[in-house]
Image (cartoon, grey):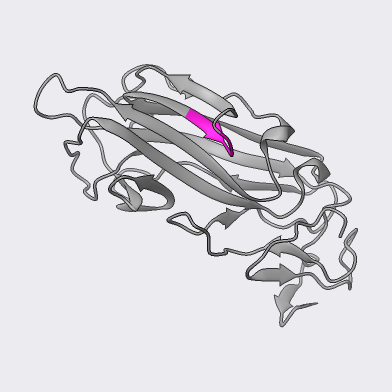
Amino acid sequence: CAGAVAVSGPAVVASTAGGGGGGGGDACYPANQPTSLSLPPLSLPPCTRPGQPVSLDLSTATFSSGVDPSWAVTPFGPNGYSTSFVPWTTLPTHWIQPKQSVVVQHHPVGTYVYTRTFNLACRPESYRSLKLTGQYGSDNSSVVTLNAPGNILATSTNSYSTPAVTLTPPPISFFVPGLNVLTVTVKNAPPASQMNPTGMSMIAKLEAICGPDCVCGCPEGTVLVDGTCVP
């Protein structure tokens, strides 16, 4: 499987039977695996044929969902928690905050780091196309990066009651094989009053078109059982 990613930890092994452009018995599709981050990563679905579209939702939780299972945050956390606040009119149904409460909370002045991890089953360059798009808002200033501090997708001075900030689709060089980390670093400014909330809201999606060297999953109509694709 020329586009496969070699990873440590649990992995799904594709059978060579009917595997399209795959080959060998390589670990082509990394499943959720332990990491040093607070939450395990989710994966872009495996490719079963060239030209297949695959996607993964990277949005923050909708209001009243409670704990966001996909976004980690420090300090407080370990997960973001869905909430709402009247002044937060930017993407108003997707706000999460560090403190674990559906009611918006006061937070100390400082920096809050939100992370969303995801796995790529294939090498970034082996997809016919690979794009990350979306919009976000934050209270207060923020920067969005992918995998490295210099890989900036967006910045905002204050975007909780303005039009949402559009993410710049990252070039292929920003992605890495296996584990990727989308990070939103938010700075909570000194309060004008005793109540000083902070949070972040995002609607984003990772989309790819499978290439001929990235066909690593089981063929359609089959499932993986004990390392073999069966009907």
Judge whether residue 93 can be spotted in this image. Answer: no
Residue numbers of the magenta segment = 144-148
Q: Nearer the viewer, residue 31 or 53?
A: 31
Residue 203 drawn in magenta: no
Q: Quadrant of residue 186?
A: top left
Eyeballing the image, is 105 above or below 192? Answer: below
Left or right: 83, with 59 as reference point:
left
Residue found 76% across the figure and 52% down from its top: 122
Where does residue 106 sit, x and y in percent of width and height? 16, 36
Q: Position of residue 214 (x, y in %)?
A: 82, 53
Front-most of residues 50 and 178: 178
In the picture as drawn, the residue positioned furthest to the left comes out as 194
Left or right, 16 with respect to 195, comes to: right
Please tell me which residue is depicted at 46% across the width and 44% down the height of the picture.
115
Quarter of the C terminus within the rendering: bottom right
- Residue 222 location, x and y as percent? 76, 72
On the rendered image, what quadrant is the N terminus found in? Answer: bottom right
Q: Residue furthest bottom?
A: 226
Name the residue at 63% across, 53% down: 119
What residue lies at 42% left-to-right and 56% top-to-bottom?
Answer: 38
Secondary structure mainly formed by the magenta segment: strand
**In the drawing, does residue 109 fall left or right of residue 230?**
left
Q: Is residue 212 visible?
A: yes
